[in-house]
Image (cartoon, helix red, strand yellow):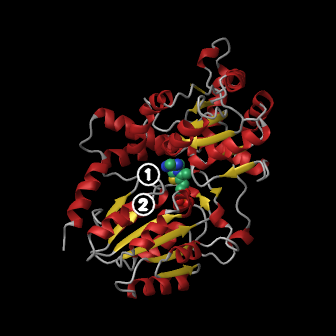
Amino acid sequence: MKRILGTLFQQIEGRFSNASASQLRRAIQTTACRLQSVEEQVQQQQKRNSEVQDMPELVRDFLDPGEFFRQVKTICGIEFFCGVPDSLLKDFCAYVTKNVPTTNHQITVNEGSAVSLACGSYMATGQPSLVYLQNSGIGNIVNPILSLATPGVYSLPMLLLIGWRGEPGKRDEPQHRIQGPATPGILAALNIPFQVLPDYHEGAAQSLETAKRYMETAKGPYALLVKRQTFLPYSLPKKAAADEAGLCFTREEALKCISEQFHQRDIIVGTTGMLSRELFELRVQRGDGHERDFLTVGGMGHASSIALGIAIQKPNRTVICLDGDGAVLMHMGVLANIAAVSPPNFKHIIFNNGTHDSVGGQPTVAGNYSQFSFAKVAQGCGYKHVMVATNENEIKEAMGKLRAIKDDGPVLLELRVKTGHRKNLGRPTRSTSDNRKEFMHFLQLN
Ligand SMILES: Cc1ncc(C[n+]2csc(CCOP(=O)(O)OP(=O)(O)O)c2C)c(N)n1
């Protein structure tokens, strides 16, 4: 242990030779945390809990996803579950995905659809549904909540389970640091009563009783905010080998492969989640700068609209949008806009791993390769060229064709890849404002 700590201090000192004491302390904490898996941290916490004896105020508990699921059903009478997954809810989402048949559980393309599904289900059964989402998705529910479900319009109750990224006092990424503190105020403005979900079962039961009473009397949506590490770990089973038969690359490997054919002047827009983090690290490994890449850290599903805006304004530059299947599904209507504008310089590459890999690997409907095809959707919208590639040769060949097509976009390339990511993937170290400034400068080059 001493030796590990010694090496750790050496590494940290090397990286932070000019750092302040607080920066150093933070680096030590985060580096040390990386040495422990979540399971190890939970085990350690449970050991600490068993040692507190008559000081229960020191106890840090966790909710068992299965037990909380049963509480939701028995206390609130909820049978239908839907939503868009979130990393803070991944254990609960995994439990529901594994144990609830698709007739009673839908992973929807966006959070607004989930709320609307819950509206329909309530009118058909008289029972509320549970809608799960990350707080970033609140923007997507504003319209169906305020203009449909809210008491005073149609008065349709539902239980919202909201992952609270960027909770004040916790370190998080830039986009979450803004959304987190704003979350309670936004819910209040939406007229949605809420409370933080306690991390022990008696407390959770009380919250659910309150939610139930509100839904029965006011007939409106009620929200539970979920803090980081509220749930005990619960993992989805690994994808069956048959489901990934014929796929050779992960998203990161495919990214490395296609990036070999990026040109110096190409403008790249990366989607929300791990793809942008992998792109950032790839640039570091290669010693490239970051100015060519816009990282769509928030605004999931909008990378292609951002890329379209740039492609229209910069007709002499090639614009490549690197998208995810979950993200494209979230606002898929924009494919029709892209095709209608038909920017000749627009290249759209979708990394379809059939999952929301960045937040826990829950399946998307795009993973059903025998029925679903982005290439066909794009073709139907009017993209000029569409291609699908699964193995290394196909990917290289398709990239060659995509490069060879000059001034005849939009072009779509769907890459079917395996799900999964490196455990030690870092986060961008450049600030979002530096990213934007350098990127805007790069766009001005001729
Ligand atoms: C509106 C909104 N909803 C949910 C999220 C949480 N979220 C971040 S990345 C992600 C998954 C993206 O899936 P996909 O586009 O398929 O990319 P992958 O992670 O599989 O590479 C989700 C759900 C978010 N950032 N914004």
Is the Cβ of the residue at disc 2 closer than 8 Å to that at disc 1?
Answer: yes
Tell me where residue 169 appears, x and y as whole percent.
Answer: 43, 29
- SS of the residue at dot 1? loop
Q: Quadrant of the C terminus?
A: bottom left
In screen coordinates, is 125 left or right of 417?
right
Give amino acid for label 1: Gly
- SS of the residue at dot 2? helix
Q: Residue 165 versus residue 48: which sits nearer the camera?
A: 165
Tell me where residue 343 appears, x and y as whole percent.
Answer: 36, 75
Give amino acid for label 2: Ala
- The residue at 69%/21% (across/down) is 217
Q: Residue 119 versus residue 174: which sits nearer the camera?
A: 119
The reply to whether residue 219 is in sight is: yes
Instruction: For ligand 1, tell me if the residue under mark 2 lies within 8 Å.
Output: no
Instruction: Find disc 2 in the rendering and name its residue.
Output: 303
In screen coordinates, is 410 left or right of 325?
left
Residue 341, labelled with which disc?
A: none
Residue that sits furthest to the front in the current view: 153
Q: Is residue 382 above or below residue 23?
A: below
Q: Is residue 34 above or below residue 278?
A: above
Residue 299, labelled with which disc?
A: 1
Q: Residue 310 versus residue 341: which sits nearer the camera?
A: 341
- The residue at 57%/37% (across/down) is 162
